Amino acid sequence: MVQARLRGGLNDFSWGFAVNDFPIVCVGGSAGGLDAYIRLLQNLPADMGVAIVIVNHITLMPTQLHEVLPRFTSMPVELITERLLIEPNHVFIIPSNRDLHVDNGEFRLKPISKPRGWPDVITVFLRSLTEYWDGKLVAVIVSGYDGDGAAALCGIREVGGITIAQKLSTATQPDMPESAIASGCIDFVLSPEDIAKEIVRIAHAEA
């Protein structure tokens, strides 16, 4: 779907256009997530027409995923910056200590809303997607502590999205996928390699 939005005040008649009709796959994780991200990306083709957004909840140190993961995929891997255009066939990495949102086909970064305790950056991003993204949504929860992301999974399904949890026996730290499964709103429980196969199937179905 093509969206047109009027920018500025009554005297400003310029229009901005954004095509948001390709799928976004949010892959949320933390402790042990790197293993899942690598296994997933190694099994994804570079030309699916899907944007992969890795939301790894780290608050204590800068992320290095944008430096590590290019070894395992031929897709461009980018650290998200303010107003970065969301494009298919790219892997996007959330920066540390930021909440992530989408608006008009671009990423928006805000100060983290939960600076103490376990972050909820995956939940925040998934809820933003349900409100502001027109294309197919896929939420993937992989290895990590706590239960970030679980609270938004039913909302993803309500807008026609697909939800996937990493198979517990394949996760270094199963707390996060276990919480996702306990939400009652998970469509598939799969290994990272089989998650990749499901993403490819979804991409082909949307083409």
Image: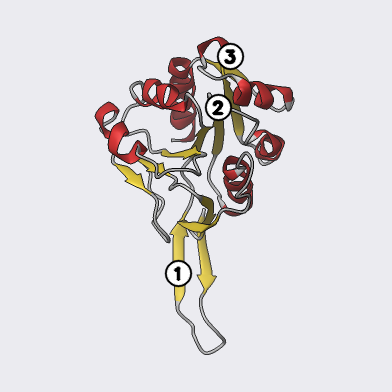
Name the residue type under label 1.
Gly
67 or 186: nearer the viewer: 67
Q: Quadrant of residue 67?
A: top left
Check the image and report above or below for 20 versus 10.
above
The image position of residue 193, as x and y in percent, is: 43, 16
Name the residue type under label 3.
Leu
Could you tell which of marks 2 and 3 lies nearer the N-terminus? Answer: 2
| Mark 1, residue position | 16
- The residues tagged by marks 1 and 3 sit, at their Cα atoms, a distance apart of 44 Å
Could you tell which of marks 1 and 3 lies nearer the N-terminus? Answer: 1
Q: Badge 3, how many Cα within 10 Å: few under 14, some, many 20+? A: some
Spot the residue most to the bottom.
Answer: 11
- The residues tagged by marks 1 and 2 sit, at their Cα atoms, a distance apart of 39 Å
For image coordinates 37% across by 24% down, the residue present is 38
The mark found on residue 144 in the picture is 2
For image coordinates 58% across by 54% down, the residue present is 132
The image position of residue 79, as x and y in percent, is: 36, 47
Check the image and report above or below for 5 versus 3.
below
Q: Badge 2, how many Cα within 10 Å: few under 14, some, many 20+? A: many
- The residues tagged by marks 2 and 3 sit, at their Cα atoms, a distance apart of 11 Å
The mark found on residue 168 in the picture is 3
